Amino acid sequence: MMLDIRGENRLGITSEILAVIARAGFDLRRLEVETGHVYAHVPGLRDADLPRLRMALEWIPGVQSVAAIDALPGDRRREALETLVASFPDPLLVVAPDGGIAAANAAAQAIIGPSATLPAAIAARLRADAGGGSLALTVDGRAYLAELVATKAETGAGKTGGGWLVIFRASQRIGRELALVGPGESGTLDRIVGESPLIAQVKDRIRRFADVEAPVLIGGETGVGKELVARAIHGAGSRRAAPFLALNCAALPENLVESELFGYAPGAFSGATRDGKLGLLELADGGVLFLDEIGEMSPYVQSKLLRFLEDGTFRRVGGKQERRVSVRILSATHRDLARLCGDGRFREDLLYRLSVLRVDVPALRERREDIPGLVDRFLGGAAAQIGRPKPRLTAQALERLTNHGWPGNVRQLQNVVFRTLTLADGPVIGLEHLDLSRDGRSGGDEGTGEGDLPPDWQTAQRRFEADLLRRLWPLYPSSRKLAARLGVSHTTIAQKLKAAGITP
């Protein structure tokens, strides 16, 4: 039986309690003392004996009560700790000062195996540096980031010692966390506003491509929402529960794009951390990696990406080990990749790999009927962000927004709505409140003239060809019939259909 003996916190009271228990003829297995409490495990004590022992204990000056309990506080804490460790989702090891494994939860036992030996890379790090840190490593073919935490304990004579906690964080788990805290819209089709025929075609392709395990190339001008389309493909597919990570290839120099994408081995180059780094391919394992502005990727990194697309393997920068992951690649560009291939700035074989499936997002001026819905969505979001009631737009203001050229597309429209709502007071936004200048300076409206026109001859030609093919395709639904109708070769039409994103 276990007892909770409550009393005053005075010197000698514990000794007197022990003496009474001994005189009563009972052995004591364990004793725990806290302020105001003495907990005792008396294994031979029966229910019939408790009243007599309680009376004897309560004769001790300062003892207030004696009650039977189910477990000692130390046992409860130990049980709670064991439950916590056992249910901890990441593999967790307790390493003794001599480097042996003192304890491991079920998740850790599953990766270190029955031998229960510390991975060699971790053992070497602990021998070299007792301060801990982190280490990128592979165990049983899976990538982990191991966090090493030094522990200390009093060993007597004023000396301290201790071991380490080793927490393994799987690359996929880190990737999911990065995806949750990263920027970007939610990956659902309802985030794509519009019911125009062109945007309906985009939504149809998203649904069709979502569960197809093949790369998708998303084309369109700057600001049309290519990343939103990529997120919608991810959100509608079988990998929706896995990470969606993104890399803007135009935002980083070549060497950083390579290390961000493939990771690097410890000490791979000057300035690299000694721990190495997991790349986005490993972090997105099982999920989707979105490569924005793929046309800005350097030829060297293009060749490494091509190899990954061919066999699913890669090496970290400075590493020797081949790594295999399951990652679906979605890419986007506002550039004419076929033209870049002709100029020798983009690999033609990589273009074929990336564009197995293709979605072309129309410019905003090509789907003006969707602008009122977008304006309403952006007004509501901006009003909630600013903390004011959603205003009403006059018919004249909405007509002006609808007829604007929008060279910056949906992104520019969103910025204009936010800027207008920030500067305008009152419940109604009229024509006089609109600031349609691209850089925020009042008085400008570059969208009513050249903003409606293509930036160059090649873009104008490409748009005309794509529009013509979309109109004729329902009437001549085969590449050979369409080639005969237009008086060109079947090969030419096949290439033009692919460039326009029309699948025969």
Image: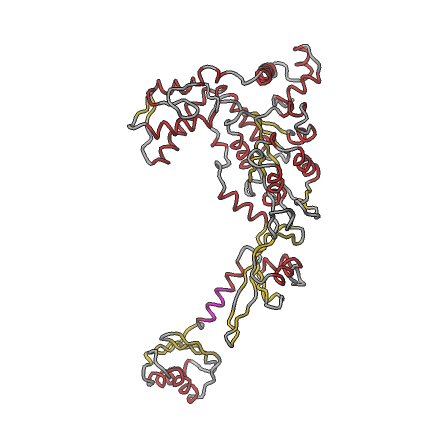
In front of the other: 69 or 311 = 311
Residue, x 46% and y 14% (percent of image)? 449
Q: Tell me, yes or no, whether the highlighted magenta stretch contains residue 113.
A: no
For this view, does 213 lie left or right of residue 16? right
Displayed quadrant of residue 147: bottom right
Above or below, 91 against 491 in this view is below
Residue closer to the observer: 469 or 125: 125
Q: Is residue 474 visible?
A: no
Residue at the image position 46 percent from the left and 71 percent from the top:
74
> In the displayed structure, does residue 54 sit left or right of residue 254?
left
Q: Quadrant of residue 249?
A: top right
Vertical placement of 296 versus 136: above or below?
above
Which percent across, then down, holds residue 495?
67, 20
Foreground residue among 288 and 296: 296
Q: Please provide percent x and percent y for residue 481.
A: 67, 14
Q: Main secondary structure of the magenta part?
A: helix
Q: Which residues are magenta?
A: 74-81
Instruction: Measuring from the top left, give residue 289's x and y in whole percent.
Output: 59, 38
Vertical order, 435 against 242 (above or below): above
